[in-house]
């Protein structure tokens, strides 16, 4: 009996970046067990990516294709928990720094990050404003040529291991003209951040998430872009994170489908491999087809301008679809292993299933993604007038 066709072999070649990203991901995999146990992102992972030149090369590229390749490879290798931290740092944070950093301070942080020498987290969500970032209460004020940032952030991935946090904040003076505060982004050193609690997440345990309090005094140069222009930068960073999350999910699905196919090849029922039974065979085939469509879509979207409203909307549509398909694929692959799929020490399926579930929330929930997609719905008014005959 032949195995199911390999999922997604049709993406265009990207020189040797893909094979080097695969090799680096293979080097990150041995770091996963300790990171999961300690619930701490392994700094060696970004050091390894930096030393391999992958981060610098990724950000020298004109589009996000190499970011998609890297995150997908991390998923295929089984490093989805570390992949969350990589997607926050190397995609969300570095996209914002690469595009908006103008001051020597911010540029030097970016340069070090590209060599894998530092780690940057993104602190946006607060207790009362996760989905609604306009409700942010962390405040930045200016005095004596410096900035003071004060507030609390509810969920910060890499919150303990990062060197810096890109913090979203509003001006201390509330506008009388608008109820929506204009946000700014300020780079705050981790030393000025107090860890209130490391959170007990269901999955992605190889990247810690922390609740933090910020009370920082930083130079004026730590502000990213113009004061009040933070929402633009944050949307840009989140779009990169969402695309990376989709790629990571797609890679994890490819791994799970491959593992389930291999298991069903070897597992026999009445002397016949289980893969010959139509139910599991078609279940895997249907999932493989969906994942392949998502994969091609991710690679294609990566070449679009992600700062445009069309780019943000399309990436939101991809992210919500990948997250929902990913949850089903992982659950079914786990199921196809029978009891062993549910055992933490016999298969990695439970870990991968928990990791993939985070994609429905991280970087914006399914509903927030659908809200963005809904903004692009276009009524077919002319076709409606000519084709629909509903008596009034
Ligand atoms: C593991 C983990 C890591 C994270 N890492 C980070 C990080 O590094 N940086 C960061 O800034 N944040 C991070 N977050 C926060 C994450 O982005 C938020 O949890 C998420 O955006 C949802 O916000 P919330 O938790 O406040 O939920 P809420 O906004 O309270 O939403 C609750 C539910 O209501 C729905 N909902 C909310 N508003 C609407 C609406 N208008 N219409 C319809 N439905 C709605 C939501 O979709 C959701 O299902 C992380 C979260 C987790 C779990």
Image: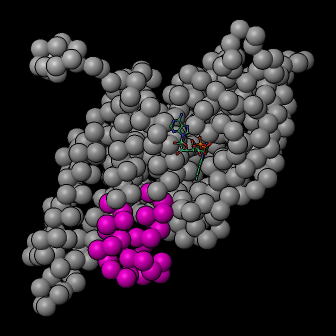
Tally of numbered tags: 0
Type of colouring: one colour
Q: Is residue 13 above or below residue 275?
A: above
Q: Residue at x 80, y 40 (%)?
A: 214
Q: Position of residue 5 (x, y in %)?
A: 15, 61
Q: Is residue 55 left or right of residue 40?
A: left
Question: Residue 19 or 160: which is nearer the viewer?
Answer: 160
One can see residue 13 in this view:
no
Tell me residue 389's x, y (percent).
Answer: 13, 19
Q: Which residues are magenta?
A: 329-356
Residue shown at 72%/28% (left/top)? 169
Q: Quarter of the image holding residue 107?
A: top right
**Viewer can see residue 221:** yes
**Which image quarter is the C terminus in?**
top left
Q: Is residue 227 above or below residue 329?
A: above
Residue 288 x, y percent position in the rendering: 22, 57
Q: Is residue 196 magenta?
A: no
Residue 349 drawn above or below residue 43? below
Q: Residue furthest top?
A: 177
Please tell me which residue lies in front, 156 or 45: 156
Residue at image position (15%, 82%) is: 273
| Residue at far bottom of view | 270
Q: Quadrant of residue 135?
A: top right
Quadrant location, the N terminus? bottom left
Q: Position of residue 12 (x, y in %)?
A: 22, 41
């Amino acid at each position: 009996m032949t195995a199911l066709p390999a999922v997604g072999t049709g993406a265009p070649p990207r020189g040797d970046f893909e094979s080097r990203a695969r090799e680096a991901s293979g080097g990150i995999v041995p770091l996963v067990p300790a990171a999961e146990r300690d619930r701490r992102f392994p700094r060696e992972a970004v050091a390894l990516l930096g030393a391999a030149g992958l981060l610098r090369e990724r950000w020298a590229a004109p589009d996000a294709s190499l970011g998609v390749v890297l995150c997908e490879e991390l998923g295929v290798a089984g490093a989805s928990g570390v992949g969350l931290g990589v997607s926050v740092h190397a995609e969300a944070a570095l996209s914002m720094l690469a595009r908006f950093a103008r001051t020597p301070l911010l540029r030097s942080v970016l340069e070090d990050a590209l060599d894998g020498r530092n780690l940057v987290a993104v602190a946006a969500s607060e207790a009362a404003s996760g989905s609604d970032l306009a409700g942010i209460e962390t405040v930045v004020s200016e005095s004596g040529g410096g900035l003071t940032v004060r507030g609390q952030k509810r969920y910060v991935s890499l919150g303990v291991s990062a060197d810096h946090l890109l913090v979203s904040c509003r001006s201390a003076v509330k506008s009388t003209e608008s109820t929506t505060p204009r946000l700014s982004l300020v780079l705050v050193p981790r030393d000025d951040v107090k860890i209130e609690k490391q959170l007990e997440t269901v999955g992605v345990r190889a990247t810690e998430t922390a609740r933090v309090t910020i009370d920082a005094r930083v130079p004026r140069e730590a502000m990213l872009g113009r004061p009040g222009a933070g929402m633009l930068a944050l949307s840009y960073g989140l779009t990169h994170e969402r695309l990376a999350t989709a790629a990571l999910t797609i890679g994890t699905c490819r791994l799970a489908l491959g593992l389930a196919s291999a298991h069903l090849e070897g597992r026999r029922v009445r002397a016949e491999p289980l893969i010959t039974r139509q139910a599991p065979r078609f279940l895997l085939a249907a999932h493989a087809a969906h994942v392949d469509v998502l994969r091609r879509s991710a690679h294609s979207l990566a070449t679009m301008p992600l700062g445009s409203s069309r780019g943000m909307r399309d990436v939101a549509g991809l992210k919500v679809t990948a997250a929902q398909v990913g949850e089903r694929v992982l659950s079914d692959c786990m199921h196809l292993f029978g009891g062993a799929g549910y055992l933490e020490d016999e298969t990695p399926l439970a870990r991968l299933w928990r990791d993939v579930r985070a994609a429905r929330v991280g970087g914006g929930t399914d509903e927030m993604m659908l809200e963005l997609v809904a903004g692009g719905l276009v009524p077919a008014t002319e076709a409606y007038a000519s084709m629909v005959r509903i008596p009034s």
